[in-house]
Amino acid sequence: IQMTQSPSLLSASVGDRVTLSCKAGQNINNYLAWYQQKLGEAPKLLIYNANSLQTGIPSRFSGSGSGTDYTLTISSLQPEDVATYFCQQYNSWTFTFGSGTKLEIK
Amino acid sequence: EVQLQQSGAELVKPGASVKLSCKTSGYTFSNYYMSWLKQMPGQNIEWIGNIYGGNGGTGYNQKFKGKATLTVDKSSSTAYMDLSSLTSEDSAVYFCARATDGYFDFWGPGTMVTVSS
């Protein structure tokens, strides 16, 4: 299943509400995860099952969507949120990732 | 605390093989799948395959069949990945990650593999 993320690059100010999009090539039944990857680090799980917040992740992160269209929202952007964000579907074997959205601070 | 410790960076010659390791602690190894993933510099993440810690049962991304072989040692709670017939296209960072219902909740720090003569 092809996963398409947009935009590829996003520049926003501290405190902004930020929305990242992920579109699946077919219905993935909410079997979607979001990861944050900082430079030189391993990805970190933020959201699973489209809208469940992983333990220890700040509540400013939230996920939503259904069917083929999903969104990651950061309610108030912080400097430490600078990273690349990937979505991943696990509805179908072979698990696939989007190409990522790089988030910068303006 | 769940921890995944990966082996160090590798520099290997084209045509050679390499074996990467992922030593785990902080959870019951035999109750979970371990996945391996590939990330080339500045690129997307690719899922290579899964292995079940309990019985060593495997599932592979078709793209990596014949390239990667996954094994486990339950006695040491360690997962391994053999990569064979290496080419420049195999130069990448390889992650192990604990799989829970298809998503990856804990990741190792990654092992960089460089294929060069």
Image (tube, coloured by chain):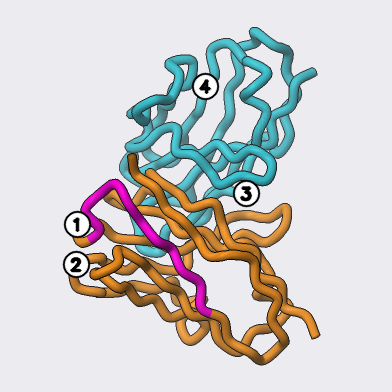
Task: Examine the residues drawn in magenta and state their main secondary structure.
Answer: strand
**Residue under numbered circle 1:** B31
| Number of the label disc, if any, that sits on residue A99 | 3
- Front: mark 2 or 3: 2
Amino acid type, label 3: Ser
Q: How many marks?
A: 4
- Name which of mark 3 and mark 4 comes first in the sequence: 4
Where is A70 relative to B48, above or below? above
Q: Position of residue B65 (x, y in %)?
A: 46, 82
A102 displayed left or right of B64: right
Alpha carbon separation for disc pair 1 and 3: 31 Å
Amino acid type, label 4: Thr
Q: Are marks 2 and 3 on the same chain?
A: no
**Residue under numbered circle 2:** B54
- Front: mark 4 or 2: 2
Do callouts 2 and 1 mark residues in contact (Cβ within 8 Å)?
Answer: yes
Span shown in magenta: B19-29
Q: Spot the orange chain and give its letter.
A: B
Alpha carbon separation for disc pair 1 and 4: 33 Å
* SS for callout 3: loop
Few, some or many C-alpha atoms within 10 Å of disc 3 (few <14, some 14-19, many ≥20)?
Answer: many
| Number of the label disc, if any, that sits on residue A73 | 4
- Front: mark 1 or 3: 1
* The hue in which chain A appears in the rendered picture of the protein: cyan
Q: Chain of mark 2?
A: B
Where is B47 relative to B104, above or below? below
Amino acid type, label 2: Gly
Q: Residue placed at 56% from the left, 48% from the top?
A: A98
- Indicate whether residue B104 is drawn in magenta: no
| Residue furthest front in the image | B76
- Name which of mark 2 and mark 1 comes first in the sequence: 1
